[in-house]
């Protein structure tokens, strides 16, 4: 999944630089990549979502 | 103070270059050259840094639009959270016990916190320097530094993509909790679906521990985890003859003077005479001063005039009657005081085996000069642990899970000592006596807590909360202030 996310990031960077008129799509890819990154982190921490210390 | 869009764009390009070449770039080198592989949480944090770099490229290309700046702040804040969550797994461990290797003396998950926090600071500084007309006057074409930043970004993300493919595989494979070192040999690649496996979703995981509630316990000895226990009758009843602030939560007796120490669940501490009918000294601790004192649940005389009181979260206070107590100094310690008590020390017991468990009892073993606590099991941590702490430094001496002596048998296949909820303990006559409010059972252990030698059912009690010894008698204190007197069973 991490590999997929880096491909999305490369795609967004390429659009922003080589196809600047496609900014809406590039930005959507950025948002999707952020959500995927957050999802993967939550998958790894779902048994204790907040830090395991005295809060 | 502001700077021109051209100047600001140049600064931003260098920020992107540093952020890209720094952690994400160096990490690829460390992975490929030294085999260092990120775990699933590290991957997310590394991706977050790359995404912040990508937002920087968007700003270089399209100008400082609000949604880019908002996204950068969100990524920085989320990155700080991820780093704190990840670091919490390791920060409290012993010296040097981090996860994977440190760099410049600091582990990667801590570097992640520093970097994301720095990103937020840099964003704030750049916004501070931004001119009102920067959005309109932002240059349309990137300059040489910007193009270099983009080229570097593509190379670094490409390197990360390659490392991610080798280390974690294509979708749906995902990063691992314990990643193996990087290898160019595909036979050594580990592509795992382990993190997708079923697991409960929880806010706090093993830290989800409900505070103990003795009122909710089943007092019937017949339902207890040990079968065929002999009964020990209550020989008579006594009563604390003075009003207390809150419910009585433990009772201790000083064998040399006959005085009693009573504590309540509302932080009341009472030194009583030998007849339980006169208050010699009393205070109400301020639970908000210094360390957090949850409701008091344990009391013990430590010899001389030193009194120890313990809260359910294993925080303790040492007190001493002192006719010359400094009222101004003691004001901070007590909500109420008779003016003749000093606080000697506040502290917290640290435990390992009993960690993440509350206690509701405190005993003092004068022969070993050690304090003794017994844990209250919870659904998350089903253990009964006897912990001993040195009086000299209040550090742990031993933490044992008692075994059952021959002659004692569980009443069912799933029943264990962890079904008991010990609310009172005392060391007397070479034994540790522990009273469980659940199933109204008296446990008799060796002083170290290695083994339960005997157990007795005590019918007829209501909310027993404390245990004290008086000569050949055991005194079971109830929350309502009544005291059940038992003849101590022969060892």
Image: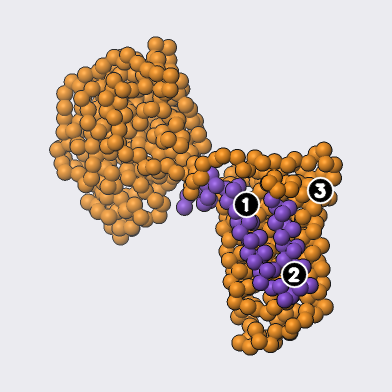
Chain colours: A purple, B orange
Residue drawn 68% across and 69% down? A25
Residue furthest toward the top? Answer: B407
Q: Which residue is mark 2?
A: A15
Q: Secondary structure at mark 2?
A: helix
Kindly report the distance in space between the C-alpha atoms of the residues bearing marks 3 and 1: 25 Å
Residue drawn 16% across and 30% down? B238
Q: Chain of mark 1?
A: A
Q: Chain of mark 3?
A: B
Viewer-side label of 1, 2? 2
Residue B221, placed above or below residue B128: above
Residue B344 lies left or right of residue B323; in this view the side is right
Q: Are marks 3 and 2 in contact (CB under 8 Å)?
A: no
Q: Nearer the viewer, residue B461 or B23?
A: B23
Residue A3, placed above or below residue B12: above
Q: Are marks 3 and 1 on the same chain?
A: no
Residue drawn 46% across and 20% down? B403
Label 3: how many residues lie within 10 Å, few (<14), some (14-19) or many (20+)? few
Q: Nearer the viewer, residue B334 or B160?
A: B160
Residue drawn 43% across and 22% down? B414
* Quadrant assignment for the C terminus of chain B: top left
Confirm whether residue B77 shows in the render.
yes
Q: Chain of mark 2?
A: A
Mark identifier at residue B34: 3
Label 1: how many residues lie within 10 Å, few (<14), some (14-19) or many (20+)? many
Kindly report the distance in space between the C-alpha atoms of the residues bearing marks 1 and 2: 24 Å
Mark identifier at residue A40: 1
């Amino acid at each position: 999944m991490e590999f997929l996310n880096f491909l999305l990031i490369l795609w967004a960077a390429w659009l922003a630089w080589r196809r600047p008129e496609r900014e809406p799509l590039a930005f959507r890819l950025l948002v999707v990549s952020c959500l995927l990154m957050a999802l993967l982190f939550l998958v790894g921490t779902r048994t204790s979502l907040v830090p395991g210390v005295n809060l | 103070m502001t700077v021109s869009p051209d100047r600001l764009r140049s600064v931003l390009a260098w920020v992107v270059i540093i952020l890209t070449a720094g952690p994400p770039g160096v990490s690829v080198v460390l992975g490929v050259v030294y085999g260092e592989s990120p775990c699933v949480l590290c991957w997310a944090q590394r991706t977050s840094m790359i995404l912040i770099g990508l937002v920087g490229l968007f700003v270089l290309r399209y100008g400082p639009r609000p949604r880019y700046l908002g996204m950068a702040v969100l990524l920085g804040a989320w990155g700080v959270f991820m780093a704190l969550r990840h670091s919490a797994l390791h920060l409290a461990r012993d010296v040097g016990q981090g996860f994977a290797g440190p760099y410049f003396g600091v582990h990667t998950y801590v570097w992640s916190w520093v970097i994301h926090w720095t990103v937020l600071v840099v964003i704030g500084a750049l916004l501070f320097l931004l001119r009102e007309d920067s959005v309109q006057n932002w240059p349309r074409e990137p300059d040489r530094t910007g193009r270099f930043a983009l080229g570097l970004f593509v190379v670094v993300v490409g390197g990360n993509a390659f490392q991610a493919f080798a280390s974690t595989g294509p979708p749906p494979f995902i990063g691992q909790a314990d990643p193996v070192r990087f290898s160019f040999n595909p036979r050594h690649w580990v592509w795992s679906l382990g993190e997708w496996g079923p697991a409960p979703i929880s806010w706090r995981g093993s830290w989800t521990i409900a505070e103990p509630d003795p009122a909710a316990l089943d007092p019937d000895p017949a339902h207890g985890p040990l079968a065929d226990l002999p009964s020990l009758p209550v020989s008579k009843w006594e009563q604390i003859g003075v009003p207390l602030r809150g419910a009585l939560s433990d009772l201790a007796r000083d064998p040399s003077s006959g005085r009693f120490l009573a504590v309540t669940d509302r932080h009341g501490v009472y030194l009583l005479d030998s007849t339980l009918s006169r208050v010699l000294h009393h205070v109400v601790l301020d639970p908000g001063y210094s360390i957090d004192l949850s409701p008091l649940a344990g009391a013990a005389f430590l010899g001389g005039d030193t009194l120890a009181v313990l809260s359910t979260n294993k925080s303790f206070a040492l007190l001493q009657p002192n006719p010359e107590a400094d009222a101004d100094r003691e004001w901070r310690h007590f909500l109420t005081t008779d003016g003749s008590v000093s606080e000697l020390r506040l502290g917290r017991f640290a435990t390992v085996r009993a960690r993440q468990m509350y206690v509701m009892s405190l005993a003092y073993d004068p022969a070993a000069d050690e304090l003794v606590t017994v844990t209250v099991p919870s659904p998350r941590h089903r253990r009964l642990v006897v912990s001993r702490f040195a009086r000299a430094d209040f550090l742990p001496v031993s933490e044992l899970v008692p075994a059952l002596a021959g002659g004692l048998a569980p009443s069912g296949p799933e029943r264990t000592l962890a079904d008991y909820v010990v609310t009172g303990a005392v060391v007397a006559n070479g034994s540790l006596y522990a009273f469980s409010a659940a199933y109204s059972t008296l446990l008799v252990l060796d002083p170290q807590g290695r083994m339960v030698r005997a157990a007795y059912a005590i019918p007829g009690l209501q909310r027993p909360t404390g245990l004290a010894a008086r000569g050949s008698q055991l005194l079971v204190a109830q929350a309502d202030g009544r005291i059940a007197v038992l003849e101590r069973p022969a060892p």
